[in-house]
Amino acid sequence: MAAEIETYGETEDGDVVRRVTIRDGLRVTVLTYGGVLERIEVGGVNVALGVLTLDDYVHRSPSFGAAIGRYANRIGGARFTLDGVEHHLPANEGENCRHGGPRNFGKRVWALREASANAATLELLSADGDAGFPGALLTRMTYFIEGETLRIAYEASTDRPTVLNLTNHSYFNLAGEGAGDVFGHTLQLEADAFLETRPDAIPTGTLLPVAGTPFDFRDAHPIGERIRAAHPQLVQALGYDQCFVLRGHGLRRAATLAHEPSGRALEVWTDQPAMQVYTGNKLTGALYGPSERAYRSGDGVALETQHYPDSPNHPEFPSTVLRPGAVFRSATEYRFARLGGPRPLV
């Protein structure tokens, strides 16, 4: 059985956007606009937030399901120095550059290179100087389903030294898209520390221990249990929007999200050093998805596997530099399961 490919719409620039449906145990729809994971259906229930139209994704979506690059998260002062040369980026969040700028990878039309029943490969060429980043960067991204696991594999190469930080920005609600807040979901993180940030969300360079704070998810507990605590890092972010430092190296489990009433659980596995946890704090009710229910603060949680924000300006952080001749490869897996056993979610 082949992938289902249909025309989703056309951008204002005349680029045709396609929707690709792949399936195995899961059913997933991918848009060539932004590499967006439009739907992730688990047992017939869509657990990923999204919007209804291409116009919504272009003009209003807060990166629902999008592929983010060249640099996910933030770069302070919208500039960085690499090999003695300072590079200036577009400032799209105060004085800082967020997610690579206003026309980041989640706002581009990717080329569909391959598609099969359970996999789709997208490709994007970002020119030298694109959004101020050096080097022509070729990125390939494959969505692959095996049973109840969705794997995202990234591969990128450059012709000049550059910096790179890729992630997927899906917001999850295991009760189903539009089902209300995720505060009753339990979350467990394989993290002993998180990055302290300034009020503008730029890291100070200090790693704070999670012990004794509302950021301690080493043991699973409800997301909403401590989200209103009077911790300055929570207050300034209006909820959880922190980068957690993951234990270990290589592909390993980073997070476990569970929703007892539905019996659904999600393990996130990654080879990246960190994960940004964001509880949709800035959703105001102005957007709604396929459920035709308004999205409000806390109605989804993003578990963004990535490198640390602002790494190009923090030499003490793990490097995000990619040089010619090297190939960046990374993988993240979303492994869905049923609470209490390995039964398939059908």
Image (cartoon, rainbow, N blue to C red):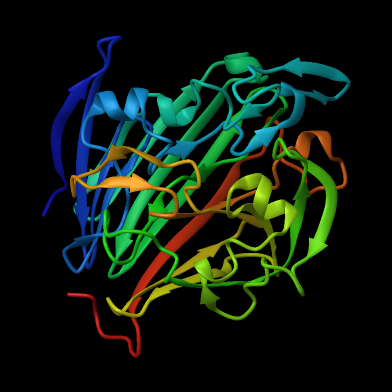
Residue plotted at (73% across, 69% down): 213
**Residue drawn 59% across the image and 48% down it:** 238
Side of 250 relative to 304 (left or right): right
Q: Is residue 11 above or below residue 308?
A: above
Q: Nearer the viewer, residue 341 or 258?
A: 258
Answer with the quarter of the image where residue 4 lies.
top left
Of the pair 246 and 211, the residue shown nearer to us: 211
Looking at the image, residue 116 sits to the left or right of residue 75; the answer is left
Relative placement, left or right, of 329 versus 81 is left
- x and y percent of residue 165 in the render? 62, 40
Residue 114, compared with residue 335, is above or below; it is above
In the rendered image, residue 199, in percent from the top left (x then y), is placed at: 73, 39
At a point 63% along the width and 65% down the height, the residue shown is 250
What residue do we see at 15% from left, 38% from top?
A: 5
**Quadrant of the snapshot with the C terminus:** bottom left
Place of residue 298 in the rendered image (x, y in percent of width and height, measured from the top left): 44, 54
